[in-house]
Amino acid sequence: MTTLSNRYEFVLLYDVENGNPNGDPDAGNMPRIDPETGYGIVTDVCLKRKIRNYVEIVKGDAAGYRIYIKEGIPLNQNHVEAYQAVNLPTENKNFKAKPDDVQRARAWMCANFFDIRTFGAVMTTGLNCGQVRGPIQLNFSRSIDPIVQQEVTITRLTVTREEEAEKERTMGRKHIVPYGLYRVEGYISAKLANDPTKGTGFSEEDLKLFWEALINMFEHDRSAARGKMATRRLIVFKHESDLGNAPAHKLFELVKVERKPEANPPRSFSDYLVAVDRIGVPQGITLLEMI
């Protein structure tokens, strides 16, 4: 695989129509919201799940592209596989792995699991496979405007319990955002990918797959609960060096998203204007508009 040699930052814009992009279990699964401002929130974990799912759909169990955090597979089961692969004992309870042993197991995990070498992982439970700080990090997403948490009552003709069999129908609720445009910012460190001891081996080929996942992750995540979701813009800043040529916050400030004055409330992506200050791009930075 080709070594990653450039630092990147990116801005991703995506929207939701009549859906719940990220339910909050502490609030009855209503869409996450900043209670002080009313802006919608989507966690980094939510987007990482969609990226993982897309990679699994595309790659399956192809060598080097397995998914570590997936439904129905205990994490420690993968640790056992790593120890067996690098010829370390898995049944001896008195065995204590040395730092070199842990490093070998860590390297095997990075080589075999896409999400570990991308986002990192804490693999110290059970058989110790060390810790990995991933080269790609995501912020929480935030909506461009305050959102409305709308509760919709629904009916169904079936009942759940036998004692309710005489009822004609039962009632339920769905929580939706009528429309919301969300922005998330992310970082990609070539240093964390290629460090001789702490690097994950994240490569140019992995990066290409990551961009593909950001653009297409909602296309294979359809459900009635999530409504219509789509990636609208992916704006990437590529540095000439692995250390970087400009502060990340300065690059993010070059991308401005504003609602059109007449669009109140906004109900589609066309109700917004996206402006990228191409003239203000610092020297040593290449602006890439993926979509």
Image (cartoon, rainbow, N blue to C red):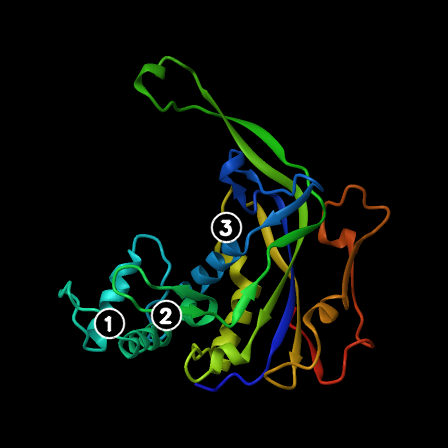
Q: Which residue type does callout 3 highlight?
A: Arg
In the rendered view, tell whether residue 91 sits above or below residue 1. Answer: above
Residue 63, x across and y down, in percent: 33, 75
Residue 273, x across and y down, in percent: 79, 58
Residue name at image x 76 percent, y 66 percent: 253
Residue 186's tag is none
Residue 203, x across and y down, in percent: 47, 80
Residue name at image x 43 percent, y 80 percent: 201
Left or right of 175 in this view: 50: left
Nearer-N-terminus badge (3/1): 1
Rendered-image quadrant of the C terminus: bottom right
Instruction: Determine if residue 58 is in view.
Output: no
In the rendered view, tell whether residue 14 sits above or below residue 237. Answer: above
Left or right of 148 in this view: 62: left
* Alpha-carbon span between mark 3 and mark 1: 44 Å
Residue 282, x across and y down, in percent: 77, 80
**Residue that sits furthest to the right in the current view:** 261
Callout 3 crowding tier (Cα within 10 Å): few <14, some 14–19, many ≥20: few
Tag 3, which secondary structure? Answer: loop
Instruction: Identify the residue position indicated by label 1 in the image.
Output: 97
Instruction: Identify the residue position indicated by label 2 in the image.
Output: 113
Mark 2–mark 3 CB contact (< 8 Å)? no
Front residue of 88/234: it is 88
Tag 1, which secondary structure? Answer: loop
Rendered-image quadrant of the N terminus: bottom left
In the rendered view, tell whether residue 141 sits above or below residue 29. Answer: below
Q: Which residue type does callout 1 highlight?
A: Ala
Nearer-N-terminus badge (2/3): 2
Mark 1–mark 2 CB contact (< 8 Å)? no
Residue 222's tag is 3
* Alpha-carbon span between mark 1 and mark 2: 21 Å
Nearer-N-terminus badge (1/2): 1
